[in-house]
Image (tube, rainbow, N blue to C red):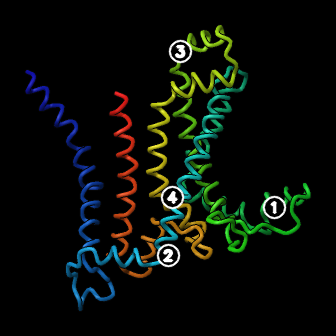
Amino acid sequence: MTVRRNIFSYLMVAPALLLVLALGVYPMVDSLRLAMVQYDLMRLDTDGAPFVGFANFRTIFNDPRFLGAFLNTILFALIAVGAVTLLGLLIAQVLNLGFRGRGALRSLVLVPWVIPPVVASAIWMWVFQPERSPINQVLKAMGLIEGNIKFLTDAIHTIGPFSIPMMAVSAVRIWGGLPFVTVMILAGLQSIPQDIYESAEIDGAGAFHKFWYVTIPMLRATLAILVTLLFIGGIGHFEVNYIMTGGGPANLTNILAVMSYQQAFTQYRFDLAAAISSVILVLTSIVAAFYIRDRISHD
C-alpha cells in the first residue's frame, strides 16, 4: 500500500518535474555547454562550433564593458533589494493596523503587481520624459529645480557608480516589486502572536523597541527567503533596463542580463552571451548557497 501511494505521488509530481527539466535545467546546462564553444552566428557556416574551453570567459573578463555591467548589476540589486525591503516593512506595518479603508488600501498596493513589466516600463518612460514629466513639473513648481531633469539620458551628473538613469530604473524595479514584498511581510506580521507584543508593552517597550526586538526577529525567516528571492531576481533582471534605456546612456544602466542579450541578438555572439549568463548563474548560486547555509545553521 505504501509503495502504491509513493508511485501515485511520483506520478502526480512528474509533469511539473518534466517541465522544470525541459524549461529550466536543460537550457541552463546547454548554456554552460555553449559557453565552452565558439558559437559566432556570422561565422558558424565556415568555422563551425569548435570547443574553446574558457576562452569566452577570458574574452568577457578582458572587456571593460563587462566589468561595468557586473558592477552595475550588483549596485542595481543592492539598491532595489534594500529599498523595496525597507518600504515593504513600512507599508506592511501600516496595512497591519486596524483602520477604516484598510481593505481598499491593500488592494491599491497590489496594482503594480498586475501590470506587465513591458507596460509598466512604457508608462514610466512617459513619466520620465524631461519635457512632459509630472515629476519635473512638481519640482519646478516647488522651486527646487530650474531646468528639466533628464531621468533616462543624463550621463553627466554622476556620483561614483550612482547616476540619475540608474536611480530611475531602480525606482521602477522597486515600484514593481513592492506588492510582492508587502504581501509577504504582511503575512509574516499576521502570524506573530499578539501576546508577545502585549508582554513587551508590560515590560515597558515602546513602538521602536517592539519593532526592533519583536517584529524583526519574528520575521527573520520571512525576510531571509524574501531577500534571497529579491537578490536572485535583481541579479538576473532584464526587462526594465532593456526597455527603458537599453543599457545606456554610456552603459550607466547596462547590467549582465542586458549585455548578454546584446551579445546574442546584436553581435550574434551566442558563446559570449552564454558566458555572461553563466556568470549570472554563479552569482545567483552564491546567494542561494548563503541562504541554505544560514537556514542549516539555524535549524
Residue at position x 23%, y 68% in the image: 33
Residue that label 4 marks: 74
Residue at position x 68%, y 29% in the image: 94
Q: What is the CA distance from the residue labelled 1 to the residue labelled 2?
A: 31 Å
Q: Between disc 3 and disc 4, whose residue precedes?
A: 4
Question: Which amino acid, mark 1?
Answer: Asn
**How far across and down, in percent of the image, does residue 160 sit?**
64, 66
Rendered image quadrant of residue 46: bottom left
Q: Which mark is residue 65?
A: 2
Q: Residues within 10 Å of mark 2 (few under 14, many from 20)?
A: some
**How far across and down, in percent of the image, does residue 149 sit?**
78, 66
Residue at position x 13%, y 29% in the image: 6
Which is more toward the observer, 50 or 113?
Answer: 50
Q: Is residue 297 left or right of residue 100?
A: left
Q: Which mark is residue 136?
A: 1
Rendered image quadrant of residue 276: bottom left
Residue that label 3 marks: 193
